[in-house]
Image (spheres, rainbow, N blue to C red):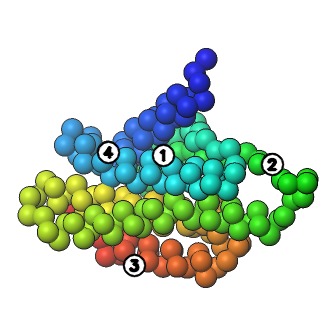
């Protein structure tokens, strides 16, 4: 049986491959796959690691787990509808030690809001970095990689901030709609601005 860390790596790699195919389909050429893989690799992996490390900072046990249904939907919906469903899994957060057995629901709500928003914040920062660097790049291939990467990161930020169901945005919205807006509004603006080559 694989250790927890190797199991987590397998789940991350499987999700990375599925999301790369979902964002690339129907153009599965090696060049397009490589370009998209860079964007998905930075956006998805660092998004999930932000959740994991933020949760660990608050004292929780946290590991990424792929969702078989999420992986299936990512490929199936893209093939049949053209829509990317970017929820291939999630960081599973397990409880932490509560001093003196005291559970503080307000503090826990705050912690989960910050854990939830951390992934989208990373995506927004990466998108801004990629767009800024693209202003100084003249190589067409490098420019394409940067624009695709910015688009994927903005898409992941916006998708995850939808204030519905199990998505990160629902937890952030419940805690503080203003905090939600500070990330969601820039994500929407950037999404409307970015045109992938």
The answer to whether 73 appears left or right of 144 in the picture is: right
* Image spot of residue 113 (x, y percent): 66, 66
Secondary structure category for the residue under label 2: loop
Who is closer to the viewer here, 119 or 29? 119
Secondary structure category for the residue under label 1: helix
Callout 1: 10 Å neighbours few (<14), some, many (20+)? Answer: many
The answer to whether 8 appears left or right of 110 in the picture is: left
Q: Is residue 106 visible?
A: yes
Label count reads 4
How far is disc 2 from disc 3 in space, using C-alphas? 40 Å
Please tell me in which quadrant of the rendered image residue 63 appears.
Answer: top right
Q: Nearer the viewer, mark 3 or mark 1?
A: 3
The mark found on residue 37 in the picture is: 4
The structure residue drawn at horizontal position 85% and vertical position 54%, both measured from the top left corner, is 99
Tags 1 and 2 touching, CB below 8 Å: no
Secondary structure category for the residue under label 3: helix
Callout 2: 10 Å neighbours few (<14), some, many (20+)? Answer: few
Tell me the residue that label 3 is attached to.
Answer: 189
Please tell me in which quadrant of the rendered image residue 177 appears.
Answer: bottom right
Q: Earlier in the sequence, mark 2 or mark 4?
A: 4
The residue sitting at the right extreme is 101
Tell me the residue that label 2 is attached to.
Answer: 97
The mark found on residue 74 in the picture is: 1
Callout 3: 10 Å neighbours few (<14), some, many (20+)? Answer: few
Q: Earlier in the sequence, mark 3 or mark 1?
A: 1
């Amino acid at each position: 049986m694989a250790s927890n860390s190797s199991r987590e790596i397998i789940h991350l790699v499987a999700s990375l491959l599925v999301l790369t195919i979902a964002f690339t389909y129907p153009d599965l050429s090696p060049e397009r796959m490589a370009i998209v893989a860079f964007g998905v690799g930075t956006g998805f992996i660092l998004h999930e690691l932000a959740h994991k490390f933020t949760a660990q900072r608050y004292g929780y046990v946290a590991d990424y787990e792929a969702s078989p249904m999420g992986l299936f939907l990512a490929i199936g919906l893209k093939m049949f509808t053209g829509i990317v469903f970017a929820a291939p899994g999630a960081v599973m957060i397990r409880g932490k030690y509560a001093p003196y057995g005291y559970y503080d629901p307000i503090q826990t709500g705050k912690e989960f809001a910050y854990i939830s928003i951390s992934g989208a914040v990373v995506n927004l920062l990466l998108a801004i970095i990629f767009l800024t660097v693209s202003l100084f790049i003249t190589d067409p291939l490098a420019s394409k990689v940067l624009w695709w990467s910015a688009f994927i990161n903005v898409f992941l930020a916006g998708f995850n901030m939808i204030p519905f169901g199990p998505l990160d945005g629902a937890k952030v919205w419940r805690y503080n709609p203003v905090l939600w807006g500070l990330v969601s509004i820039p994500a929407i603006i950037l999404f409307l601005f970015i045109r992938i080559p």
